[in-house]
Amino acid sequence: MYSLGLLTILSCLLTLLLTPLMRDWSVRLGLVDRPDHKRKLHNAATPRTGGVPILVSYAGAYALLLLLPLDASGLIEENFGMILRLLPPVGLVFATGLLDDWLNLKPWQKLLGELAAAIWAYEAGVRILGVAGHAIPAWCSFLVTVAWLILCSNAFNLIDGIDGLATGVGLTATMTTLIAGILNGDATLALATAPLVGCLIGFLRYNFNPASIFLGDSGSLLIGFLLGSYGVIWSQKSATMLGFAAPAMALALPLLEVGLSIVRRFLRNEPIFSGDRGHIHHRLLERGFTPRRVALLLYAACGVGAALSLLQSVMRSRFTLLVLVLFGVATWIGVHYLKYVEFESARLFLWVGLRPMLSSLVKLKLLEGSLLAATSVEQCWSAVEHTARSLGYSHMTARLGGVRFATAPERAKNGAFWQMRLNLPENDYLNITQREGSCEQPVLVIPFIDTVRRILPEKLAQLGSTAVTQENSVAAASLSSLAGVVERSSSQGVPRNSRTRTVTSSDCAAPSVNAATAS
C-alpha cells in the first residue's frame, strides 16, 4: 500500500517542480493561448503546454520508485507489464495533442492520431471483452474499445473550457478509479492510477482560477486517454453484471458533454466538430455563476457520479439497477436546469409540430399526384386551391394557361399581410396572400410553392399541346365547316379573342361545395 502513496507523492512533487519551469519556457517561446473575447475569455495570454509536466512526472515517478532500494519496486516490476505496454500509445496521443497546440491541426488530422493510439492500445491489451456480462466477438470488441478511447479523449478536450475544470474532473475520476482498484484488489489498476492522482493534484495548484497555465490539447487528450484505458481495466475486474457502467459513471460529466454537444449541433444543423459557447460550463456562466463557482459546482457533480459508480461497483447485482436509475434522474435534472434552447425546440416540435407537419407533407404529395393526373387547367386550379385551403392560406390569385382564377371574397386590405408570388412561363403566375388576423395557421409555404413550380409549368404546356393537337384533328376532319365558321366570323367583324377569362372560387378559409365557378 505504501508504494501507492510513494508514487502519488513523487508524481505530485515532480509536477509542482516542473510545471512553473514549463510555464516560463512556454512564455518565452510564445506557446500561449491568446484571448479572443468570444470563446476564450481569459484575461491574458496563457501557456497551453500543461500536458508536458504531467506526462514527464507520470513516467518519472515510476523511474524514481524503481531506483529506490525499496520493496515497492519489486511490486511495480511484477505488475508493470500492462503499464509498460500502454506507454507508447499514450505517448502517441500526447504527441497528437502537442502538435495541435503548436500547429492547430485540422479535426481529421487530430482524429487520425487518436485513432492510431486507440488501435495501438487495443493491441497492447486494453480491450472491452463484454457488455452487460455478455462476451462480444473480437471484431465488436475492437470497434467498441477504439470508439471508447477516442470518446474519452475528446470528452476531456471539450470540458477544458474554464480554469481548472478538466484537471479537477480528471482528478475526481482518477481517485475514483484508484479506490475501485484497491477495493477490487487490482494492483495493476491501482499502480496505473496512483501517479496520475499526484500529477493532477500538483498541476491543479497552477491551473485553478486564475490559471497561470492551461492543460492544452496535449494535457486534455492525455488525461482522457489514460482514464478511458483505466475504465477498460476496471470493467474487466468488476464483479457486477453491469461492470462497465461504473467507469462510465465516474466519467459522466465529460461523456455527457460530448453527447450534448453532438445532439445540439445536429439539431442546429452545424458541423459536429465546430466550436460554440453551448457547453455545460458556458451555460452555467450565462446563468450568473463565476468561473470558480462553475468549477466547484461541476466538481461536486462529478463527486456524486464518482460515489454512485463506486456504490454500483461494490453492491450486489439486484441493487445496481436502482443506482443507475438514481444516476439517470440526477443527470436529467441537471440537463433540464441548463435550459438548452435546442432541446426545448425539439420537444415542442415532437409533441406539437410533428403531426401537423407530417399531415402537411402528405397533402403536398396528394397535390403532386392530382396535378400529374389533371386533364384540364380547371382541374389544376382545383387541386392547387384545395391544397392551399387545407394548408391554411387565406387568399390566392392565379393565371394558369391564360385563364385567371381567384378565391373570393378577398379579405379587407387594412392591416399587415405577407404575400408570395410564383412567376410561371407564358406570363402565368400564382399569388398567395395572408392577411393579419386570419384564423388559419399557414404551414409549408416554400415546399408548396416548390411543388407547384416543379410540376405545373410542364403540365400546362402538356395541356396546351393537347388542345392544339385536338384542334388540328378537328380541322383536318371538317375543313369546309371550319372555313365556314371563319368566313362567318370575318363577315361579322368579331376579332378572335384570347383564352383569357376569370374564374372566381370560394374563399380558402371557408370550404365550398362549388370549388370553381365561371364569372
Image: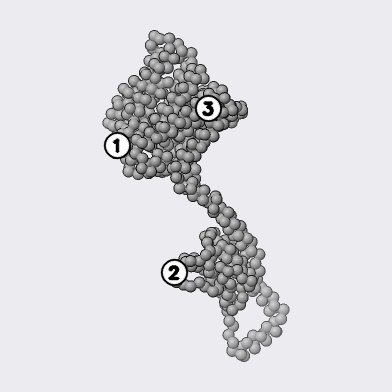
Crowd rating for badge 1 (residues with CA inside 10 Å; few <14, some 14–19, many 20+): some
User: Can you tell which mark lies on residue 235?
Assistant: none
Q: CA distance from mark 2 to mark 3?
A: 64 Å
**Residue found at x 53% / y 31%:** 323
> Could you tell me which quadrant the N terminus lies in?
top left
Q: What kind of element bears circle 2?
A: loop
Q: Is residue 462 visible from the viewing direction of this image?
A: yes
Disc on the earlier residue, 2 or 3? 3
> What residue would you read off at disc 1?
45
> Could you tell me which quadrant the C terminus lies in?
bottom right
Left or right for 94, reference 243: left
State which mark lies toward you, 1 or 3: 3
The residue type indicated by label 3 comes to Gln
Q: CA distance from mark 1 to mark 2?
A: 56 Å
Do tag 1 and tag 3 residues touch (Cβ < 8 Å)?
no
The residue type indicated by label 1 comes to Ala
The residue lying toward the viewer, choosing from 226 and 200, is: 200
Crowd rating for badge 2 (residues with CA inside 10 Å; few <14, some 14–19, many 20+): few
Q: CA distance from mark 1 to mark 3?
A: 43 Å
Q: Position of residue 96 (x, y in %)?
A: 42, 31
Disc on the earlier residue, 1 or 3? 1
**Image quarter of residue 383:** bottom right
> What residue would you read off at disc 3?
312
State which mark lies toward you, 1 or 2: 2
**Residue found at x 35% / y 28%:** 204
> What residue would you read off at disc 2?
415
Q: Please determine whether, in this image, residue 443 is positioned above or below residue 179.
A: below
